[in-house]
Image: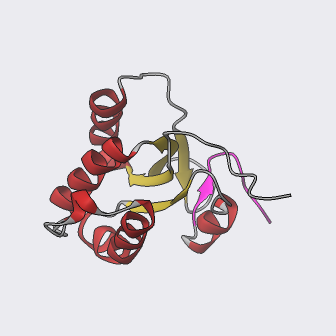
Amino acid sequence: MGDQRIMTDYLFRVLLIVPSARKDGLDAFIADEFDDAEWLIVELSPTGTAPTTHYATCFACTMEQSSRWAERLSTDGGVSLPPEFSYYNADQRIQFITAARPALKANTGVIVYVCRNDGEWFDVEAILAGETIKRIGEVLP
């Protein structure tokens, strides 16, 4: 049957989980980088009840956009981008962001997951469970 991948310029799928104190920065990032105010922002908390402690969003992006958000995450998160980052292919960029995830979380509280948009996406439910965080309104026994 061959390769059934979708051909698109949007090579990456990104999940950002941002502490409430950084929500204004997330809003500014979305407005600046993607020129779109109609994003789904999901409210989260450890218990699934108010108050909201984190916000999450998921988006697809291009190579060019990935350079801008990776630069922003690394600048805000204190993780330097390698000088050759602009030459990285999609898989190398994913590997870099994945390796930087613990430092970004420790330095900023921001949690970032990235995968290829044309393959198997990450499991959002497993990520939320692993981060011990739930959607507001999702109170489980």
Observer-nearest residue: 1 or 13? 1
Considering the whole magenta stretch, tell me its main secondary structure.
loop
> Compared to 46, does 20 lie above or below?
above
Q: Is residue 84 left or right of residue 135?
A: left
Residue drawn at point x = 35 percent, y = 23 percent: 35
> Compared to 109, does 66 lie above or below?
above
Q: Quadrant of residue 119?
A: bottom right
Any magenta on residue 140? Answer: yes
Q: In the image, residue 75 lies at what x, y percent? A: 15, 58
- The answer to whether residue 53 shows anywhere in this view is no
Q: Is residue 11 left or right of residue 98?
A: right
Kindly give the residue lying farthest to the front in the view shown. Answer: 2
Q: In the image, residue 33 lies at what x, y percent? A: 30, 33
Residue drawn at point x = 65 percent, y = 58 percent: 121
The residue segment tinted magenta is: 133-141
Q: Quadrant of residue 93?
A: bottom left
Kindly give the residue lying farthest to the right in the view shown. Answer: 1
What is the basis of the colouring in this image?
Answer: secondary structure
Q: Quadrant of the N terminus?
A: bottom right
